[in-house]
């Protein structure tokens, strides 16, 4: 099925551990995004990518890294997990273009707790 | 920089009543505007979107939104709310060539029977 796949769905980390959240899309979209959503809050943009090899910071990039070696994959890495990074993480892919056909897909989210 | 403001954090309406959720945006050029709904513990579902043309946009589940450039607003409306509409609603702004999709803080809708 076409869409965005995020893994894992749930994860508990200890402070200082590292991990990579995976995001894969099969729609050949150039634009991909990582957001975090804290309880009762909106989505904050962490990083985004406009194509393979190109990434840029969003609103809240500190403590995270990304890479985009292929069009399909956009992993998000936490190097030294901190309690403040406890959140739900959403990945999205969008095909921006002219006109009204702007397909976009969001993943189901990764619920991350850091203790 | 683009930004989105949703002035109402919580709104409570009675079932069958009309609904309007406010969204104000800041962006220098013509924006692309979106409304999403999120049920508890779920992901985002796109309700509707505006890119150009007719300023009144129809979406799914009986929702509509009106783009008002002079007021920098994109308010979401529904003429008669159902109990199943209780959820969190997010407005977002993006633009071709700008690359980012920025969300508002959301409005939590409660529906009384």
Image (cartoon, helix red, strand yellow):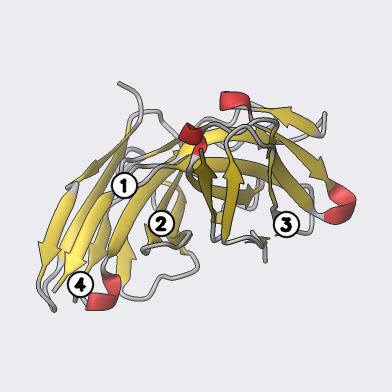
Q: Are marks 2 and 1 in contact (CB under 8 Å)?
A: no
Query: Circle 1 sits on which residue?
Result: B41
- B58 relative to A61, above or below: above
Query: Circle 3 sits on which residue?
Result: B24
SS at mark 1 in the image: loop
User: Do pointers 1 and 4 mark residues of a single chain?
Assistant: no
User: Do pointers 2 and 4 mark residues of a single chain?
Assistant: yes
Give the chain of mark 3: B
Q: Residues within 10 Å of mark 1 (few under 14, many from 20)?
A: few
A102 and B43: which one is in front?
B43
Question: Along the horizontal axis of the image, is B4 left or right of B44?
Answer: right
Query: Circle 2 sits on which residue?
Result: A35
Q: Are marks 2 and 4 in contact (CB under 8 Å)?
A: no
| C-alpha distance separating marks 1 and 3 | 26 Å
Quadrant of the rendered image containing residue A6 = top left
At a point 64% along the width and 50% down the height, the residue shown is B93
User: Do pointers 2 and 1 mark residues of a single chain?
Assistant: no
Depth-wise, is mark 3 or mark 2 nearer the camera?
A: 3
User: Do pointers 3 and 4 mark residues of a single chain?
Assistant: no
SS at mark 4 in the image: loop
| C-alpha distance separating marks 3 and 2 | 21 Å
């Amino acid at each position: 099925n076409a869409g965005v796949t995020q893994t894992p769905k749930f994860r508990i980390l200890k402070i200082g551990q590292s991990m990579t959240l995976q995001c894969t899309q099969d729609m050949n979209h150039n634009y991909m995004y990582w957001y975090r959503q804290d309880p009762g809050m909106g989505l904050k943009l962490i990083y985004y990518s406009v194509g393979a090899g190109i990434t840029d910071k969003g609103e809240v990039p500190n403590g995270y890294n990304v890479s985009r070696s292929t069009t399909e994959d956009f992993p998000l890495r936490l190097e030294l997990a901190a309690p403040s990074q406890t959140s739900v993480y959403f990945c999205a892919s969008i095909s921006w273009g002219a006109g009204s056909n702007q397909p976009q897909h969001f993943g189901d989210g990764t619920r991350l707790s850091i203790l | 920089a683009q930004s989105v403001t949703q002035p109402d954090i919580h709104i409570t309406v009675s079932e069958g009543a009309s609904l309007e959720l406010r969204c104000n945006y800041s962006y220098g050029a013509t924006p692309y505007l979106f409304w999403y709904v999120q049920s508890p513990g779920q992901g985002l579902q796109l309700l509707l979107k505006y890119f150009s043309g007719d300023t009144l946009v129809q979406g799914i589940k009986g929702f509509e939104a009106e783009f008002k450039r002079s007021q920098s607003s994109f308010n979401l409306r529904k003429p008669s709310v159902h109990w199943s509409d209780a959820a969190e609603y997010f407005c977002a702004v993006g633009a071709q060539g700008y690359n980012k999709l920025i969300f508002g803080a959301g409005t939590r809708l409660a529906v009384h029977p």
